[in-house]
Structures are given as structure tokens and as C-alpha cells.
Amino acid sequence: MRKMQIRIRIAAAALLVLLGVNMARAEDDSSGKLAGDGKQRPRFRLELKREFTNRGTPDETSRTQIKIEGYLDGIVSLLRLEVPFPDDKTTFEGDPFNPRLGDIKVRVGFRPVRLESIPLASFLEGTFPTANPEELGKGKYQVSPGVRANFPITFGQRLPESHKMTFEPLVQQVVSVAGDENRANINYTKFEIFLRDTWRGKYWLKLTAKPIVDWEQGGNTGSVVELEPGWIISRRWRVWLLFGSRLWGGDTIPMTYDKRVGINASVDF
């Protein structure tokens, strides 16, 4: 119980730091506008996810997740806190009214730089073994650098102007650096390859493939594919669904699962 209280306090402290930094930045620039376009952008995003998952690895089961993001203007452009609450029951239906604390993630994102004409956004993510019970997490401290590129897609006259398509590949390396010596070490490379079509600035459809190469298992691979239809209700509110399925690989490959259905919402401030 005492360990649980300490972990909750760590999560609360991280949340307060994130909110404090974000509020300080907002006070420094109360207009919240981007130079040159006059559009107000969010300084803060709160996201709530509910996912039903079966045949996943320990940290890929049915759960509720809270994600908080702060957007900054300097070299550090993103601060993110993810707090998962996996269900006590690890079945597809789960038990949403009996959640447990999972492994907390913190991400620092850096201002994009250009390689030729391609914007590259890098980030550094840390995962903390806060899960209680410990079986619902990996039991390891993890460090994970990554980089993402963004390519707008044009089809000339064949695609109506009301559609905006983007292609974004991501690569992320995840390694464990400390933690429970009795738990398996972590060393895998994660790829995300997604194509997104936004229609009339209100609706989107996103298709994502997520291949994984697990170096702790001799380079064995696995992958899931996810389809995400979404609706931009207003400048602040968004809702979307997620449907995921395994493409290949066994259920020991990290970050994979057999089936997933998600219901998600976010609000900007």
C-alpha cells in the first residue's frame, strides 16, 4: 500500500510540473497565436481513451488512459504525460470500474528541424515501473528516443481540395535501463507508418501499421494494424474510434495484441 501511495504521488508531482510549465508559458504569451497565420493554437490538451484489448502483452490489455500534453514555443515543443489504468481483469471486456495503475510514461518533444524539405520531429520518452500490481507493467525503467517525419500528399486534380492527406513514418527505439532484475530486459524497435486523410477540416480517417522488431527475442517481428475514424466537433473537441488487429507475429512481441476497440475523446485549452 505504501508503494502504491508513493507511485501515485510521483504521478501527481509529474502532472503538477507539466501543468505548471504549461501555465507559465501561457502567461508569457497570452495571445496563444502562431506568428504569420493569426490562428490560435492550443496550449494544453487533455485526452481520455478507453480501450478493449484481448491477447495482448502485459501492458497491452483492456484499460482506461489519461494523456495530458502541453505545447511550448521553444526548442522543447511538447511535454506529455500518459497515465494508464489497466483493468483488474485482463479479458477483452475487462472491468472498467475496477482499474489499477499501470506504467506511467513521460515524453519530451523537440522543435522540428528540416532535412532538405522534410520536417523531422524528435522526442525522448521515459517509462516508469509504477504498475500495481506489478504484473500489469513491465517492471523496468525504459528510455525511448524516436523521430517522426511528415510528408503531405497531393494528387493534383484527382483529389478534391476538401481532402488533405499526410503520410508520417515514425521510428522509436525502446530499451530498459534499470528495474526488477527478475523481469525480462527490453530492447525493441518500433515503427509506425500511417496515412491520414482529413476531409473538409472536420472528419478524418487514419490507417496505421505498427511493425515491431524485438531484439531480445532474436529479432523476431510482429505487427498490428489500426483504423481510426474521427470527428473534429469544434476547435476544442475531438472524438474518434479505433479498430485494431494483429497482422503477424506471436503474442510475446511487445506492443502487440490480437484485437482492439477504442473509444477516445480530447479537449484543447
Image: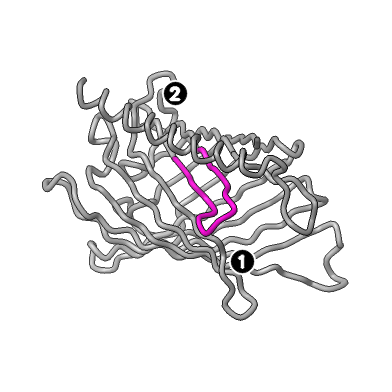
Q: Residue at x 41, y 27 (%)?
A: 94
Q: Residue furthest left?
A: 182
Q: Tell me which amino acid carries mark 1.
A: Asn
Disc nearest the viewer among 1 and 2: 1
- Check disc 2 and report its element: helix, strand or loop: loop
**Residue 96, label in figure:** 2
Residue 135: x %, y % from top left = 24, 36
- Residue 28 lies in quadrant: top right
Specify the label residue 150 is tagged with.
1
Q: Is residue 76 magenta?
A: yes
Say left or right for 67 vs 40: left
Which amino acid, mark 2? Answer: Pro
Magenta segment range?
Answer: 68-81
Whether 240 is drawn above or below 148: the answer is above
Residue for point 28% across, 30% down = 7
Lateral position of residue 244 relative to residue 125, left or right: right
Is residue 59 part of the magenta span, yes or no?
no
Residue at 62% x, 47% y is 228
Q: Quadrant of the N terminus?
A: top left
Could you tell me residue 98's position as x and y percent? 38, 20
Q: Is residue 208 above or below residue 1?
A: below
Q: Is 236 on the left or on the right of 114, as rendered?
A: right
- Pick the residue in front: 184 or 28: 28
